[in-house]
Amino acid sequence: MAKINTKTKPFPKAPKLRHLIGPSFILLGLGLGSGEVILWPYLASNYGLGIIWAAVLGITFQFFMNMEIERYALVKGESVFVGFNRMWRGLPYWFMASTFVGFVWPGMVAASAVMIGAVFGVERTEYIAIALLILTGLLFTLGPVLYHVVEKFQKTVIGISVPFIFILTIYLAERADWVALANGLIGRGDGYLFLPEGIALAVFLSAFAYSGAGGNLNLAQSFYIKEKGYGMGKYAAAITSPVTGASQSKHTPSSHARVEPTAENVKQFKEWWGRVNAEHALVFWMAGAATMEMLAFLAYLTTYGAPNTSAS
């Protein structure tokens, strides 16, 4: 095992909040998957809005969990995966395998290809899916710094999609629909309280678990804030492209900065802690909860009570 070179560094001063915006956009963008796009709209279309309280509760739980993950990276200047590796060298293989199994199936890109094919009248959508995968690979390979590419991409996607969802919802909804949504936030559904009769518990718990991100995606938040340069991450090396990235030779994977718990360092940490909490609350919790509600609301407006809608 390589020897870890540790250098004592002062805790950096916290920048203004607007300069910290970024990492939570990535987590929010990754979270706009099974929970927001599929599971909660599915439940709302079949059981109404009386279950939407659980989406808000789920993402609230994730907010506090994510902040503890961020606390580690803020002080250590490394991702939690590096810390787990220090505990046991076999853990990285578990994280790689569990992430690969969940994301290896190109379901989302295939669904996107079908949508694009429907718009442009293309029948062989598998070629569109292949092109999208290649484009994604090129974006991540050719971008000089991986984190910057992902952050800009997610900000663009969310900046376009979320306002569109809100505008569409406002256009379709009537006053009675908004009342139903407000009632759903306190667990009052159409003839039930909190949980409707016959709801599949496995599906409900899956939606609850993925209210926001879920699984290894939450742990990856420590990597994003390290790459953004939060706290002691300022002294860490960024992951760059092997093709276009600049050299990071002054840093090595086996080195990291250590901070002493002096009065000044603790003061700076508290400044950081308040601002990173605000960043995550505004972007991940507030925008994430609102987006989940609106997507489920859209499903409710367009399919709830329709003859072909079935929970089976």
Image (cartoon, grey):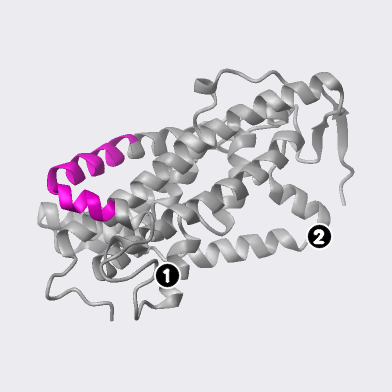
Secondary structure state at the residue bearing disc 1: helix
> Mark 1 = which residue?
204
Residue 240 lies, in percent from the top left, at 58, 35
Q: Residue at x 59, y 31 (%)?
A: 276
Q: Residue at x 81, y 60 (%)?
A: 88
State which tag comes first along the sequence, 2 or 1.
Answer: 2
Asked whether 11 or 291 is in front, the reply is: 291
Is residue 166 covered in magenta? Answer: yes
Judge depth for marks 2 and 1 and give the one in front: 1
Which stretch appears magenta? 159-181
Real-space CA distance between mark 2 and mark 1, rounded to the nearest whole angstrom:
34 Å
Residue 22 lies, in percent from the top left, at 50, 32
Q: Are marks 2 and 1 in contact (CB under 8 Å)?
A: no
Residue 142 lies, in percent from the top left, at 47, 37
Q: Residue at x 62, y 42 (%)?
A: 67
Q: Is residue 85 visible?
A: yes
Kindly identify which numbered label has been placed on residue 142: none
> Mark 2 = which residue?
88
Please state if 150 lies on the left or on the right of 166 as rendered: right
Q: Residue at x 67, y 45 (%)?
A: 68
Three-letter code, disc 2: Trp
Q: Residues within 10 Å of mark 2 (few under 14, many from 20)?
A: few
Secondary structure state at the residue bearing disc 2: loop
- The answer to whether residue 299 is above or below residue 258 is below
Residue 14 lies, in percent from the top left, at 65, 20
